Each structure stands twice: as structure tokens, then as C-alpha cells.
Image (tube, coloured by chain):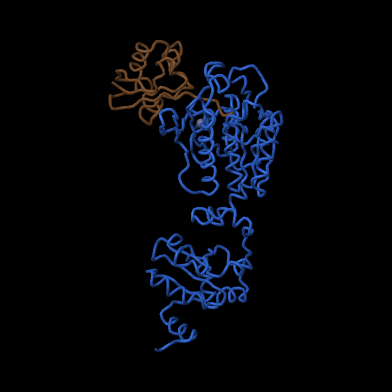
Chain colours: A brown, B blue
């Protein structure tokens, strides 16, 4: 099981939890498993074609998946995945 | 008991101290492996004139601060005073501390001037500034030179809101000499929960004026330039071009992409941050030094309405206080050229969990602005880029 950090805008899908654990293997599997456990979450991360939205960063430990192998990036139980969407707020 | 006169002591010490004359010093300073020239005169003497490139470390502080200035005990050091007497005794003292390559400049600054060599009058802090900034200047990473850099610096804040408030206050307190403020809004009662530069009495007044008044109460060294306007593709180059670096505290995506592109195209460092609810993030985009930009991190904006702003989702009032202060730390580091800037690193703060984390942000070789074959070479229509109808916003 891999720990996934959920940003506050998406915690309404995880009953307010900041960290959840799901089985992984790679990022696509992890996202499908997130969706199974927390329905609606995948639609916030991926577009209709299943691509990760380009204003969302997903990090495996400290590395963004676009700099790894994208959705095929490997994830082990020892890794920590963080979802970090763009935020505009500053005022 | 036996005693020595001052002259006898000097004669005795001179035998063990290396001396160079001002001609040898001039020649040595022109070499690539030049000695560090330390002027040990008192401040009032130094203020009258100094050799270019000399460091000032008065005799009374020499032994206590030399290790900050000269780490390598074998590095070449030349000591200068007014007439070459004080430096003989100072050189012996440094030799006792293990410095192996110290020379006293015979004849001192007087001989340098008499030889017709060039000198300059140092820029100095005023007495008021010396008192105000003493906690800065006592640190070797800042010093008087660093404080003068801060006083000379020009920093632009996009937005005088949650992030811009602490940034403006701390930049002003630090003595950043010119602070530009871009904000079109007036102060609203709902701002006071977090925008600490504004006061009850400022409600309905333009934010740039309210902020200017607060800064004037804090530090007369600071010149505030108010730009009561939206930043747009038409004025961005003209406004940003006047400053050394930019802090982004805007509240919408079109402005974030606009400011990113303008800073990247002008080669200005951009200290970017954003906040939402209990989360904050901060990073430095510095494409002129090879770092990534906002588009490298977030290639496309979210469709309108998909990512709520603070007006819809809320924000803990103190959170922009933390994140805006981190932006200010990065600004001061860049101005002083100390430490390691947050270039290519994003720091995320999760206030509910009480955790800071750091992520790597890599430069995207295909970035349309800072990549190898850029396609965005001038400012575009950012409302259209973000798919939002044109509106009035900062
Ligand atoms: Zn870029």
C-alpha cells in the first residue's frame, strides 16, 4: 500500500483525510485504485482521455511524474505520492 | 621590571612582520591571485577615503571577526592603516592566530594617497541607519555592504493582499529601498482577516495608498511606487522592467501566466507563491540563471471554475503570512546573493498537518517560454489563454 497525500481542495472526496493508502505499482493503477476507494477523485485528476490534467503535479517522493515515466512511473509501497494542483490564491 | 616604550615595541615587532610598500601593494592588487586588503582604520578615517576593493575591519574588532572574513589561514592578506604603525602590531596578532601570509602596508593609506594612486570615498550608512539595521549588519552575510545592496534594491509586488502584505512590511523593515506595488483594488472589510498592511481606517481606500501609509510609518528609507492598475500585456514590460525582481501575490491564473511570461522574457527573477485554505506553496522562477518557470511546473491553466480561489474556498488568515514571509526571505537572499535560492525547488506547507515538504521542479526543454525552441516570444492575451471572459481583476 502506498501513501498518497491529498491536497485540501480534494479532501472532500476522501472524507477529509489528508493521507490515504491504496495499492499501487504505477501511477495509472494508483489513480484507478484511488477512484475505486474514493469515487469522483479520478475526474479531478485526469481528463476524459485519462491523461493527467496539466495543471496538476503528481510527485513520487520529490520527483514530478512528467520528469519520470508519466502515468507509467513505478510506485512502490516505500514511495510517497503527493498530489499538488496549481493554486491561484494570493489575495 | 623592564619595560618598553611604544617605539621600542614597534621596532621589536617589526623584525618579525613582513612589510610591503604601496607600490608593491598596487602591483599585488593587479594580479589575479591578489591579497585581501583589510583596512583596519576607525570608521571616521575610512569614511574620508579608501582603496577600491578594500574591506573595512577596524583594529578593535580585527581578531574577533577575521575568521569570518579570511577562512584560509594561508591566504594572502595585506593590512592597511593610516601610517603603517597600527598594522605592524595587527600583523603580529594575526600571525599568533596562525595566519601565515600577512603583510603590513608601510606608510599606510597616507603613502597610498601621496603616491597619487586612486582612492574612493566609501558609501556608508547614516547613523540612524546604522542603529536601525544593526541586527543585519552584524551578520557577515549582510554587513554594511549587504545593507547598502538592500537599500539600492527595487522589488515589485504583484498584489498587496494576503501574500503582498507581509512581504511589503518585511521588505520595508529590511530597508529594501524601492518597493513597487501593483494593485487595482480598494480595501474591503473582508481583507483585514489576513491583509495585515491595511487598517480599519483604510476601508474603501486604494490598497496601494493604504500600504504606502503603513510603510511610511515604518521606515522612511523606503520609497513606495504605487501602480494603481491591473497588470496587463500592455503595461507589464514597462512596469516590471523598472525592478530587479518580482514577488507574485496575485489571485488569478491569467495574471500568474502573464507575470511568469513577462519575467522570463525580461530575465527577472520571479518569487512565486500561492495559498488556498490551509495549503501554501513557494518557489523561485529564475530562467536567466537556467531555472524552470511557472509553465514548466504547470504547462496549462485549469479551465475556469475548476480550481476555486480563496474567495470561494477560503484561506486561513495567517497562512499567507507564512508564505509571503518565505517569499520575502527568498527576495532578500537574491538581493544579498547569499544562500541557496529556491530555484527548481517548490516548498509546500500543509498547515493542518504541520508539515513542510520540498519537491523538485525541472526545466521543461519543450517549455513554450523558457525551453529550447520557445514559441511564446511576446506577451499574449492571457484571459483567452485561461479561457476566461475579460474582466477587471488584479
Ligand atoms: Zn518554462
Location of residue B70 in the rendering, given as x and y in whole percent from the top left corner: 44, 62
Q: Residue at x 53, y 77 (%)?
A: B84
Q: Residue at x 40, y 89 (%)?
A: B2
Q: Is residue B386 above or below residue B179?
A: above
Location of residue B297 in the rendering, given as x and y in whole percent from the top left corner: 48, 28
Q: Is residue B25 above or below residue A9?
A: below
Task: Locate residue B203 relative to residue B370 in the image: left or right.
Answer: right
Of A60 and B116, nearer the camera is A60
Q: Quadrant of the N terminus of chain B?
A: bottom left
Find residue B169 and report its image quarter.
top right
Task: Locate residue B17 relative to residue B202 in the image: left or right.
Answer: left
Location of residue B383 in the rendering, given as x and y in whole percent from the top left corner: 62, 21
Location of residue A24 in the rendering, given as x and y in whole percent from the top left corner: 30, 19
Q: Residue at x 55, y 62 (%)?
A: B53
Instruction: Return the residue found at the far front.
Output: B200
Q: Is residue B188 above or below residue B32?
A: above
Of B10 and B174, nearer the camera is B174
Task: Locate residue B26 relative to residue A80 in the image: left or right.
Answer: right
User: Total of numbered circles in the picture?
Assistant: 0
Of B179 and B294, nearer the camera is B179
Q: Quadrant of the C terminus of chain B?
A: top right
Amino acid at each position: 500500500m502506498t501513501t498518497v497525500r491529498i491536497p485540501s481542495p480534494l479532501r472532500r472526496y476522501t472524507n477529509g483525510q489528508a493521507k490515504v493508502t491504496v495499492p499501487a505499482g504505477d501511477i495509472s493503477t494508483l489513480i484507478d485504485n484511488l477512484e475505486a476507494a474514493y469515487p469522483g477523485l479520478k475526474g479531478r485528476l485526469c481528463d476524459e482521455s485519462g491523461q493527467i490534467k496539466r495543471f496538476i503535479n503528481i510527485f513520487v517522493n520529490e520527483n514530478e511524474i512528467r520528469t519520470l515515466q508519466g502515468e507509467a512511473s513505478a510506485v512502490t509501497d516505500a514511495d510517497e505520492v503527493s498530489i499538488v494542483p496549481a493554486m491561484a490564491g494570493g489575495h | 621590571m623592564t619595560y618598553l616604550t611604544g617605539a621600542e615595541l614597534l621596532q621589536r615587532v617589526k623584525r618579525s612582520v613582513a612589510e610591503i610598500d604601496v607600490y608593491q601593494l598596487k602591483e599585488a592588487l593587479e594580479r589575479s591571485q591578489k591579497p585581501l586588503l583589510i583596512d583596519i582604520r576607525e570608521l571616521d578615517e575610512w569614511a574620508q577615503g579608501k582603496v577600491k576593493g578594500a574591506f573595512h575591519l577596524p583594529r578593535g574588532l580585527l581578531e574577533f571577526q577575521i575568521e569570518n572574513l579570511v577562512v584560509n589561514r594561508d591566504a594572502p592578506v595585506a593590512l592597511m592603516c593610516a601610517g603603517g604603525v597600527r598594522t605592524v602590531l595587527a600583523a603580529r596578532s594575526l600571525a599568533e592566530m596562525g595566519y601565515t601570509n600577512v603583510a603590513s602596508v608601510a606608510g599606510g593609506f597616507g603613502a597610498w594617497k601621496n603616491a597619487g594612486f586612486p582612492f574612493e570615498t566609501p558609501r556608508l550608512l547614516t547613523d540612524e541607519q546604522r542603529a536601525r539595521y544593526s541586527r543585519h549588519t552584524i551578520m557577515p552575510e549582510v554587513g554594511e555592504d549587504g545593507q547598502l545592496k538592500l537599500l539600492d534594491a527595487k522589488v515589485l509586488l504583484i498584489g498587496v493582499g494576503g501574500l503582498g502584505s507581509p512581504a511589503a512590511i518585511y521588505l520595508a523593515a529590511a530597508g529594501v529601498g524601492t518597493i513597487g506595488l501593483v494593485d487595482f483594488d480598494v480595501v474591503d472589510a473582508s481583507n483585514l482577516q489576513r491583509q495585515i498592511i491595511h487598517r480599519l481606517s483604510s476601508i474603501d481606500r486604494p490598497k496601494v495608498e493604504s500600504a504606502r501609509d503603513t510603510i511610511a510609518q515604518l521606515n522612511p528609507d523606503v520609497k513606495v511606487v504605487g501602480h494603481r492598475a491591473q497588470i496587463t500585456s500592455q503595461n507589464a514590460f514597462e512596469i516590471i522592467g523598472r525592478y530587479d525582481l518580482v514577488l507574485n501575490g496575485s489571485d488569478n491564473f491569467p495574471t500568474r501566466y502573464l507575470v511568469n511570461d513577462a519575467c522570463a522574457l525580461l530575465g527577472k527573477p520571479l518569487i512565486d507563491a500561492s495559498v488556498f485554505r490551509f495549503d501554501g506553496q513557494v518557489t523561485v522562477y529564475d530562467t536567466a540563471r537556467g531555472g524552470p518557470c511557472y509553465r514548466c511546473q504547470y504547462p496549462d491553466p485549469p479551465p475556469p471554475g475548476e480550481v476555486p480561489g480563496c474567495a470561494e474556498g477560503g484561506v486561513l488568515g495567517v497562512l499567507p503570512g507564512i508564505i509571503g514571509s518565505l517569499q520575502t526571505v527568498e527576495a532578500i537572499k537574491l538581493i544579498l546573493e547569499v544562500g541557496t535560492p529556491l530555484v527548481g525547488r517548490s516548498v509546500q506547507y500543509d498547515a493542518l498537518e504541520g508539515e513542510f515538504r520540498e519537491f523538485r521542479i525541472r526545466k521543461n526543454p519543450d517549455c513554450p517560454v523558457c525551453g529550447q525552441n520557445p514559441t511564446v516570444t511576446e506577451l499574449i492575451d492571457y484571459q483567452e489563454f485561461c479561457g476566461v471572459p475579460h474582466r477587471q481583476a488584479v
